[in-house]
Image: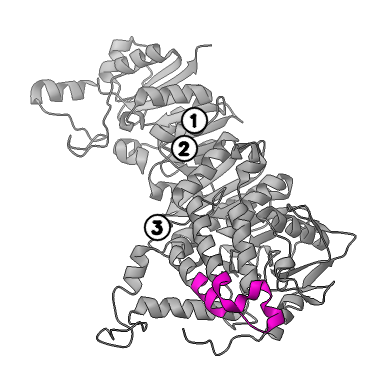
Amino acid sequence: MLSRVKYDLTMAEAARGAGGARIDLLVVAAMVDQGARVLDVGCGDGELLRLLESRGVDGRGIELSREGVNECVAKGLAVVQGDADTDLAAYPNDAFDYVILSQTLQATRQPRIVLEHMLRISRRAIVSFPNFGHWNIRLQILLGGQMPRTRNLPYAWYETPNIHFCSIKDFRALCFAVGAKMDQAVALNAWGRQMRLKMPWWFWNLFGEQAVFLLSRRS
Amino acid sequence: MAEATTTLDLADRTREADHPHSPVARFGADKPLRLDAGVDFAPLQIAYQTYGTLNAERSNAVLICHALTGDQHVVNRHPVTGKPGWWETMVGPGLPIDTERYFIICPNVVGGCMGSSGPASTNPATRLPWGLDFPVITVRDMVRAQAMLLDHLGIDSLFAVAGGSMGGMQVLQWAASYPQRVFAALPIAAATRHSAQNIAFHEVGRQAVMADPDWRGGRYFAHGTNPRRGLAVARMGAHITYLSDAALHRKFGRRFQNRDNPTFSFDADFQVESYLRHQGITFVERFDANSYLYLTRAMDYFDLAGDYDGVVANGFRGTPTRFCVISFTSDWLFPTSESRAIVHALNAASARVSFAEITTDKGHDAFLLDEPELFAIVRGFLDGAARSRGLRA
């Protein structure tokens, strides 16, 4: 499944909240207002959509992998087989209240265009991604001299589907470039738990394993 | 080609067209069917089958729309061929379209030959079969006639409309024409319009029928003939388009039929030839040649965008219907790109849509075959819709 394969959340799978939901998904879900219309791009097996629907959200999904789609549809979720890079263009302006891109940005061919489409078809976007500025990754390149691999990013460079890694700092620059307003930014540790300390950006860029951004269109 | 030994005689054929082995609804001159061709057609007869029980709220009705050469006999023994129904894998007790849960209606389409008004039916004015005097019909006409049937049965809104191929076209037309009457729509291996390639295939089939001297300008009933060869060739050609290269190769390869060496003749040396000939011969037993012309024409004319300023999405604006679009990887007659176009139009209309492409080498006909993934998806979609509709499990 797209999101699960591209970012293998072994640690996050292990860390689940009281209701059994993955904590990083709970962080994303908490950003969504009740009753909203949501498009989850790269929805995998539909776990986030189910979580959202249980909270009265009208959720739709796009998923690249056939297995993921078929599993979602068999669960009664409104999911279409499609590709973030090509299929977002088919949606009209302001079709949704939120578009969510969970652990998928780094696997798209054109992250900037994907983000621009997200903010076209919805006023707000939620993007989560693995932070390539994390100290462990920096150290692996600096000291090991090799492309980094972690428990959550286990692929070798020659077989990874992740082709556009970025750090939190890089992503902020992209937000400025596309004119997105950062309404909320959350860093998560390897288990998907929110890091609660009030800290400057450089700190998150060094110690956050994942980041979740709530963006809105500058009008 | 060998003559079929069990071919219906003409009297049998018109008997099934006029007095089918199915319930019928009749509409007189006071309730004509308004056709796209600009004709008010009356009297109209619709033959249909039902399975299961309509609940007290009348909220569990599922309309099944059959494909080009299908009919209303979804899960009962076919009255002409004696074979099982055409969707026994999908419809039945405990199956995805569950007869213990839903009330299933399948009408024979207008223009068909199994009891709904069509070219094989008797024209009351002449007391002869209509033949080519029957007006040309469209997919929208079929759907209008189905809506009349539902009115007649006292069913206001459908829980679901499902169908593959031409049936899928009817599903899309239903959702566009009567959005308030369709809670869930399941177009399978379908398209919003018939492609140029598909029109071309149909034209070859029609020309094969019309080139048969027994067709007699469509008046074969009056001449006591039947264009068997032409219709069989049409069916053989069409049947290839329902399969795939991979499926044909898997089933037949280059294997010989009951022989070890080629005969150096034009006998059916290859298994695939023998198979196709069999398909052609068995088809003419149960199908009317003129009906084949009319129904292929109806598919050719289908172009949903044409009714909505060239934009399919306009046909679905504000639709309350939820959709589940399904395609098959090896279907080259209604390829996945056509289903994707449906999905894009539905997305543009902000409709609630699911779309799955199923991996199979069985081609277009996969929707009729044993495809566990198809069943899981249809079941999941209908279960989800039933929960939203408040139908009991």
Q: Residue at x 21, y 38 (%)?
A: A155
Crowd band around label 1 with a 10 angstrom C-alpha radius: few (<14), some (14–19), many (20+): some
Q: Is disc 2 in contact with disc 1, using a CB cutoff of under 8 Å?
A: yes
State how far apart marks 2 and 3 are (Cα): 32 Å
Choose top left, top right, bottom left or bottom right for residue B150. bottom right
Q: Which amino acid, by three-letter code, is at mark 2?
A: Leu
Crowd band around label 3 with a 10 angstrom C-alpha radius: few (<14), some (14–19), many (20+): many
Prevailing secondary structure of the magenta residues: helix
Q: Percent x, y for residue A57? A: 58, 34
Q: Which amino acid, by three-letter code, is at mark 3?
A: Ser
Q: Residue at x 71, y 85 (%)?
A: B11
Q: Percent x, y for residue A51? A: 50, 38
Q: Chain of mark 1?
A: A
Q: Is residue B64 above or below residue A194?
A: below
Q: Secondary structure at mark 3?
A: loop
Q: Looking at this view, is A35 or A164 the one in front?
A: A164
Which of disc 1 and disc 2 is earlier in sequence?
Answer: 1
Q: Looking at this view, is A198 or A153 the one in front?
A: A153
Q: Which residue is mark 2?
A: A48
Q: Looking at this view, is B124 or B356 the one in front?
A: B124
A129 falls in the magenta region:
no
Q: Which amino acid, by three-letter code, is at mark 1?
A: Ala
B234 falls in the magenta region:
yes
Q: Which residue is mark 1?
A: A29
Q: Is residue B147 above or below residue B126?
A: above
Q: Which residue is mark 3?
A: B330
Q: How is the image coloured?
A: one colour
